[in-house]
Image (tube, grey):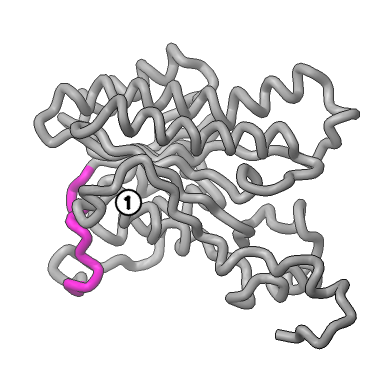
Amino acid sequence: MKAQRQTAGQRSSARDLGLDKKVVLITGGTRGVGAGITRVLADLGAVPVVCGRHPGAEDDVEFVACDVRDADAVDAMVRGIAEDHGRLDGVVNNAGGSPFALAADASPRFSSKIVELNLLAPLAVARAAHAVMTAQESGGAIVNVSSVSGHRASPGTSAYGAAKAGLDNLVTSLAIEWAPHVRINSVVCGAVLTEQAHLHYGDDEGVAAVGATIPMGRLAMPEDVGNAVAFLLSPMAGYITGSTLTVHGGGERPAFLAAATADNTM
């Protein structure tokens, strides 16, 4: 975010998504995927406000300390942003994640906390944003950052996968309840190359091996997710709500292709 950015006058029309000066809250926006989303939105002229429990290394983006699992704190944060900026145009529910833990070994408290962070917290943020957005003539848009873990088996992160499945289902319900004033969609992410990728995939060799299993030949970059989020927040997606946009580079090559002895090389 300290890299040189284009001004509004320098941006090419191809990158003008109608987000200039739009105020957007990004939860967990200080690192990883959230930081990539923040960079994309800032480059498109939006006014990003990031929240988290601790500030990141960048000092040129507005930061608000908030534990999104605390509904009262979330309400106060969203009201404060709307008061400070005069409106809230968009929200990106990005905060989430889970360490590896087999279901039989994880404590009930651990599982509850994972579901709380990945499902209940985004709901609390969305509800607080909805209260603000319905009071402004321009309405607003919400994007949940979800995962392919919610759409296939998620061994070692089963509570996380279940929560993400619930998050995507929630989008379909809220889209109906909140249309037409507030749009809500999900970006369903596959493997993303962040500063914590080694926790899931190992060293550089492991990351490269995982990337080789993806049809596009690499893991997603955080900005790849940011581009999808920006589109869904923009007026270009003005008729899109209750949808999931999958950003996974073509998905995962079926395991049977590697196991089969028939000539099915690709």
Residue 211 picture quarter:
bottom right
Magenta stretch: dominant SS? loop
Q: State the residue position of label 1.
A: 232
Q: Residue at x 55, y 53 (%)?
A: 189
Q: Examine the structure image and report whether residue 177 is included in the region drawn in magenta.
A: no
Q: Nearer the viewer, residue 161 or 20?
A: 161
**Does residue 189 appear left or right of residue 5 in this picture?**
right
Relative to 60, is 134 above or below?
above
- Badge 1 density bin: few <14, some 14–19, many ≥20, Cα 10 Å: many
Q: Residue furthest left?
A: 137
User: What are the residue bounds of the magenta stretch?
Assistant: 12-22
Q: Nearer the viewer, residue 163 or 113?
A: 163
Q: Residue at x 67, y 28 (%)?
A: 114
Disc 1 marks a residue whose amino acid type is: Leu
**Does residue 104 appear left or right of residue 65 in this picture?**
right
Residue 185: x percent and y percent? 38, 43
Residue 202 picture quarter:
bottom right
